[in-house]
Amino acid sequence: MTNGWPRAGLRRGCIELRHLLRNGKEMSGHLTNVVVALLIAAYVSDDVPGTRTPMAHLVLAGFAAYLLFQIGLVNFPQILVTEREEGALLRLRATPGGIPAYLVAKCLLVVVTAVATLALLLAAAALLADGPLPRGPGDWLTLAWVTTLGLLAVVPLGAAVGAVLPNPREALALVMLPTMGLLFTSGTVFPITSLPVPVQQVAAVFPLKWMAQGLRSALLPDTARTAEAAGSSELPMVALVLTAWTVLGFLLAVPLLRRAARRESGSRLSARHRKAAQSGAAPA
């Protein structure tokens, strides 16, 4: 019975995707992110320093990476924390293969959402603002593997983060602040070479910098690579860093989710609900 968890996870993921498509509030949130990226790019002028590539194209490529990063490391943990507060992990304790199936379902939901958001951003940018698109088969291949590896790097990490966050009310603040910090220090909204070297070195530890660098390689012309810290796209290093984060995320995610499930009990859940009700934030 436990061997059927991949199929159960895929089936559950498909059900959750259908629910997402019917949820106007959540869908509007993803659409809003795309609109914000387009508006910011529309107000950016000039070219990337030392090139004839519009700065707006660099911003759009960076925001494409950030949207993938945000869905994996902000939206995903919030979903997990909210469902934990509603008793989802407690129910999974009694289900053989429940935790792996749950993780498969959530990964499917997040990956499809992220890819659809990325496709919408690139299509809208190309149609409305002459935005960047891959110029040949090699660039399309780069876009595909960077997107895939980038999501593999952040989705399991998002699951691990969601397993340890205290509650939905604090989850957004605890995750959003460092995420916004990485947005401005990872070269997503302006060339990373304009940042101090120590800031560049710190950003290079995290996956967003490499996701943005890989997407810029796929979407921008070769001349734009002079604005990269190393003067090139460093695609082998992009693959290496994102693979390292993928391994780390998977090593952390399942044990932390299992630990969170083991710690769940009816009394703990009831106590949290009483505390939330007293503070006027009872879960739905």
Image (spheres, helix red, strand yellow):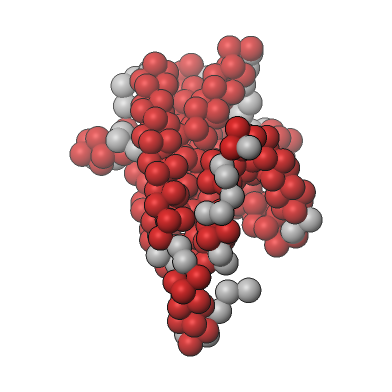
**272 shown above or below 119:** below
In the rendered image, the residue lying farthest to the bottom is 278
In-front residue for pair 124/142: 142
In the rendered image, the residue lying farthest to the left is 198
> For the point 58% across and 12% down, which residue is it?
138
Residue 115: x, y in percent?
64, 36
Q: Quadrant of residue 88?
A: bottom right
In-front residue for pair 21/262: 262
Q: On the rendered structure, is 212 left or right of 109?
A: left
> For the point 40% across and 44% down, which residue is it?
255
**Residue 60 visible somewhere in the drawing:** no
**68 shown above or below 29:** above
> For the point 55% across and 28% down, which residue is it?
148
**Residue 19 visible somewhere in the drawing:** yes
Q: Quadrant of residue 86?
A: bottom right
The C terminus sits in image quarter: bottom right
Q: On the rendered structure, is 196 left or right of 135?
A: left
**147 shown above or below 254:** above
Q: Quadrant of residue 254?
A: top left
Q: On the rendered structure, is 111 left or right of 204?
A: right
Count of marks overlaid on the render:
0
The N terminus sits in image quarter: top right
Residue 49: x, y in percent?
40, 30
**231 shown above or below 82:** above
> For the point 72% across and 41% down, which residue is it?
11
Residue 282: x, y in percent?
55, 79
Residue 224: x, y in percent?
46, 23
In-front residue for pair 198/132: 198
